């Protein structure tokens, strides 16, 4: 259903969402390039950060381009197959975000609480296994909810109260009794919200307990600084997710649900690169080095053209 049918607001919405999408793409791709191009950043923490940025790009790309096309063509309609595809990719990337944040908390827990065994525990094989498990579990969740929607043979209507194919909105359109669907959705919510949050909270409980035993204030600051960016992203991710859930539960207006979803699907992936780059010296140094390498050939060709003229 989108945001507004007012023609005067369409250019403003188009400019806003297009700029947010481009900033999200640029920021996350810049982090991926900075990490992959700098050998000093080939560590477990940056490996998972690179994976998180890739998941954020996919998370945003499943919804925003279709929204931009809908604004340009003044047609918010989507086909049944397109809706299922969008929902599947949205769930896959969203669950990847969720699980990667949990794995990154575990990585910080091992780095701070078991520093002497860090390289042994977080070896390349284990990091690859953890990433593969995140992908497999996310894929299973996406397939499960996709099959649940495929099992619905009667819809009460064709209007989804959001700007993308939100699974909860699709289930609410079921003509039949939705009790069994609600039970499965709540179980999925427990698995992908309560368990990851419990793991993150436990990791930070052990981290804080370990940091408080550090005698020097400099060591405490260094330990806290390595976790600050991740903790900020966790609060932003889960805070906006709970906001979307509450707004969809207590508000019947489609606009309020869509606005809450914008924060969750666009604002959070857009801010993640800024949070990690502004609070991390290694990322800033690698980004500057990457930009200087990219700018050098352009500067050379510019000066060569001036000299030739």
Image: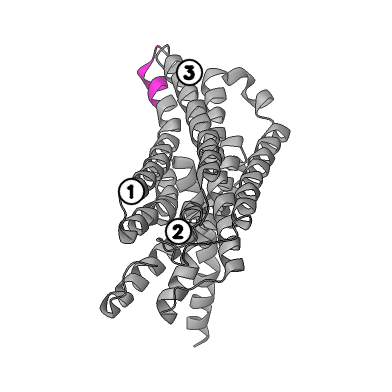
Q: Where is residue 78 in the image (x, y as percent from the top left)?
A: 52, 71
- In the image, taking residue 86 as reference, residue 26 lies left or right, namely left
Classify 178 as above or below 153.
above
**Nearer to us: label 3 or label 1:** 1
Picture coordinates of residue 246 (x, y %)?
Answer: 34, 44
| Place of residue 231 in the rendered image (x, y in percent of width and height, measured from the top left) | 42, 34
Placement of 179 over or under 308, stated as above or below = above
Q: Mark 1 Cα within 10 Å, few/some/many (few <14, many 20+)? A: some
Marks 2 & 1, CB-CB < 8 Å contact:
no
Asked whether 219 falls inside the magenta stretch, the response is yes
The local crowd at label 2, few if under 14, some if 14 to 19, many if 20 or more residues have their Cα within 10 Å, is many
Relative to residue 14, is residue 111 depicted above or below?
above
Distance from Cα at disc 2 to Cα at disc 1? 24 Å
Element marked by disc 2: helix
Residue at 39% x, 14% y is 212
Nearest the camera: 107 or 248? 248
The residue tagged 1 is: 247
Q: Is mark 3 on a helix, strand or loop?
A: helix
Foreground label between 2 and 1: 1
Residue 136 as seen in the image, left or right of residue 51 = right
Q: Earlier in the sequence, mark 3 or mark 1?
A: 3
Residue 206, label in figure: 3
Q: Nearer the viewer, residue 48 or 287?
A: 48
Which residue is at a point 54% across and 36% down the rendered structure image? 187
Range of residues picked out in magenta: 215-221
Q: Residue at x 68, y 43 (%)?
A: 136
Mark 3 neighbour density, 10 Å: few (under 14) some (14–19) many (20 or more): some
């Amino acid at each position: 259903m989108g945001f507004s049918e007012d023609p005067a607001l369409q250019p403003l919405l188009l400019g806003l969402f297009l700029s947010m999408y481009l900033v999200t793409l640029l920021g996350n791709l810049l982090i991926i390039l900075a990490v992959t191009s700098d050998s000093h950043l080939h560590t477990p923490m940056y490996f998972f950060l690179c994976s998180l940025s890739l998941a954020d790009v996919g998370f945003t790309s499943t919804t925003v381009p279709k929204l931009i096309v809908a604004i340009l063509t003044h047609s918010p309609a989507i086909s049944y197959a397109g809706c299922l595809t969008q929902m599947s990719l949205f769930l896959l990337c969203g669950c990847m975000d969720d699980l990667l944040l949990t794995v990154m908390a575990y990585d910080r827990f091992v780095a701070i609480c078991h520093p002497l065994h860090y390289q042994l525990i977080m070896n390349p094989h284990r990091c690859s296994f953890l990433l593969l498990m995140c992908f497999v579990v996310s894929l299973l969740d996406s397939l499960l909810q996709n099959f649940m929607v495929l099992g619905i043979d009667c819809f009460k209507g064709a209007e989804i109260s959001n700007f993308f194919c939100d699974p909860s909105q699709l289930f609410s359109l079921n003509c039949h009794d939705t009790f069994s669907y609600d039970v499965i959705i709540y179980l999925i919510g427990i698995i992908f919200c309560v368990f990851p949050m419990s793991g993150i909270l436990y990791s930070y409980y052990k981290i804080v307990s370990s940091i408080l035993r550090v005698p020097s204030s400099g060591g405490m600051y260094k330990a806290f600084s390595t976790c600050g960016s991740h903790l900020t992203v966790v609060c932003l991710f889960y805070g906006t997710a709970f906001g979307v859930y509450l707004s969809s539960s207590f508000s019947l207006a489609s606009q309020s649900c869509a606005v809450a979803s914008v924060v969750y699907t666009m604002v959070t992936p857009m801010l993640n690169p800024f949070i990690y780059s502004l609070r991390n010296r290694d990322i800033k140094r690698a980004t500057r080095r990457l930009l200087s390498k990219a700018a050098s050939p352009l500067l050379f060709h510019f000066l060569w053209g001036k000299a030739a003229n």
